[in-house]
Image (cartoon, grey):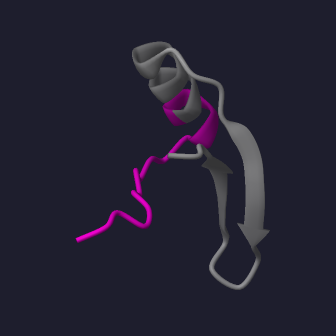
Amino acid sequence: MSLDHLVVGSANLNAAQSYIEESLGVSMQTGGTHAVFQTHNALLGL
């Protein structure tokens, strides 16, 4: 089995990104937006 990606859902992307960065001691990069689904994301390479 290999891990392709993980998803963390949040009502506030900035708060979730800050939490993950502080918890893991890493920096995430801005991801894309999906206008049809009204979503956006941040990315972290595994």
Task: Look at 59% across and 46% down and name the residue there.
Answer: 45
**Residue 23 occupies quadrant:** top left
Question: What is the magenta segment's predominant secondary structure?
Answer: loop
Please state the extent of the stretch shown in magenta in the rendering: 1-16
Apparent side of residue 31 relative to residue 13 in the rendered image (left or right): right
**Residue 40, how many percent across, how many down?**
68, 60
Within the magenta stretch, is there residue 23?
no
Query: From what the image shows, is residue 43 above or below residue 6?
Result: above
Q: Based on the displayed image, in which of its 4 quarters is residue 6 positioned?
A: bottom left
Relative height, residue 3 to residue 16 (above, below)? below
Q: In this view, does 22 lie to the left or right of 38?
A: left
How far across and down, in percent of the image, does residue 39 sit? 64, 66
In the image, residue 44 sits, relative to residue 18, either above or below, namely below
Q: Residue at 77% x, 45% y: name it.
A: 30
Q: Quadrant for the N terminus, please.
A: bottom left
Residue 32 in the image: state x and y as whole percent.
Answer: 77, 62
- The residue at the far bottom in this view is 36
Residue at x 63%, y 33% (from the top left corner): 14
